[in-house]
Image: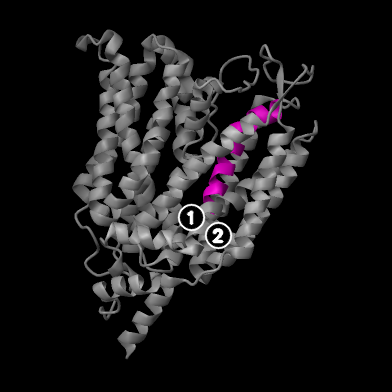
Amino acid sequence: MEGSEAASLLGERGLGRLAQFKTYRRRWFLLAVVSLLNCSNAMLWLTFAPVADKAAAYFHISLEMVNWLSIVYLLISIPFGLVATWVLDSVGLRSTVILSAWLNMMGSVIRIFSVLKFLGLDSQSYWFLFTGQCLCALAQPLIIFSPTKLAALWFPDHQRATANMIASMYKIYSAGQTNMLGMLNAAGLPMQKPHLPCEVPGSWETGGEAPANPLGILIANVLSPALVSEGKHIPLMLGVYAIPAVTACAVATVGIHEKVPPTPPSASATNSSSQPFLMGLKMLLRNKPYIILTVCFGGGIGIFTCFSALLEQILCEKGYSNEFAGLNGALFTVCGLLGAFLLGLYVDRTRKFIESTKICFCLSALASIMFAVTSRFRHRAITLAITSSLFGFFGFAIYPIAMELAVECSYPVGEGTSTGLIFVASQIEGVILMILLQALTVHVSEDPSSTCAIDQDGALDWTTPVLVLAGLCSAMACFYVIFFHTDYKRLHAETKSGDLVKA
């Protein structure tokens, strides 16, 4: 039974044996290292997205092969995600962060080998580039799963949500959106490219990337075009992008000395070290609230993936420019960061995890309905901008809180396992949703006001997919509100520990 297994785990680790707790200033250093790793990994992931055409010309390869430099992240992250959860909960945070930093750094350095002319690689240069991307992709799950573990081990209970928010927002939502679109494009599924006078950052050849990993993606979309005005500048770009990766690796290797703090910051932190992975996995699969959270929140990430990745195509059909779509994406991201920051502070003070996520999920669903309706009309720029802002504000805010809630409802299962399974589920659900929405598009005759490029089969109408997207978001919100109920197991365990100490 789940209860007896949980009691066994708690008994083994002796919750409540410590008479006092302590925080250390170096927790902020660890948070900075994990944040830098997240940012660097996102930059390496999307290095070639804004300059795909120049990269293809420089390496004498097709755009599809450039797409595979992003697709490999998705292909590796799903199976390796389960391995990463085991590594984080069994080996520990220090080893996980250092391992991910070295994988990230080696990947960035190996990419540079592909442009060193004196090596005489010629036709093999692309495969060095691809190998480097694979190493960076291996680092991604390890990096993504670390913030929740870091918050649990090093931060007191009133700072956990904020710490998780700071580190997670470097790699939030749509962790596979560029990969998915590139994969669908390479597979030959019907996709529609916005008509642009010239290619811009995040254009279709890159796989339809949209701003969803806020800082890393914004830097990549700004820095890559700035560095690569011509194909000959590709080596310079690879060198510049290796700097954060090398820096993060050096800082992590030299600066992180301890697996856990000498004195834990909270009672639950005494139980955040290694534990039997298979036992924890079995407990999660028997945990009804956790399953509901995984399905609903994973689906929510998939919905945000589709919204971010398809935004340009949805809007261009009604005559909105690519610049306006980019503005909506920026508002979506910036307002989301603001929402996550404010909600993280609020939850740290009130502990209202369930109420906050339910309210934000419902408001996100309302925003998705507003967008689905408004986007079907022309000349509604202001309304669309407001709707995108609200969608991002309430939707992004859920992410760090839901990750903390996953730990609360699954305690004493390790943080890496509980958050890692949600990530894997979100990747799978995102792929399914993307394929479904693409299948629901309808070819229509050419519209003079459309800014989309028209292929040989005509333009694509997105009315049905957008309505389905809003319907799924609303259904998941309702299901989550009605059926998700759980105790705050970690907080209750800490309370009991405090009572034992007082006694």
Whole-percent x, y for residue 367 in the image = 70, 48
Q: Is residue 419 magenta?
A: no
Q: Which region is colored magenta?
A: 297-316
Q: Is residue 313 above or below residue 148?
A: above
For discs 2 and 1, the disc positioned in front in the rendered view: 1
Residue lying at 30% horizontally and 9% vertically, measured from the top left: 123
* Residue where numbered disc 1 is placed: 400
Whole-percent x, y for residue 315 in the image = 70, 30
Residue lying at 55% horizontally and 55% vertically, measured from the top left: 398
Residue type at mark 2? Leu
Residue lying at 33% horizontally and 75% vertically, measured from the top left: 7
Indicate the quadrant where residue 70 lies: top left
Residue type at mark 1? Pro
Which residue ends up furthest to the bottom in the rendered image?
503
Residue toward you, 68 or 47 = 68
Alpha carbon separation for disc pair 2 and 1? 9 Å
- Crowding at dot 1, Cα within 10 Å, few <14 / some 14-19 / many 20+, comes out as many
Q: Which mark is residue 386?
A: none
* Residue where numbered disc 2 is placed: 343
Query: Judging from the image, what secondary structure is the residue with disc 1 in?
Result: helix
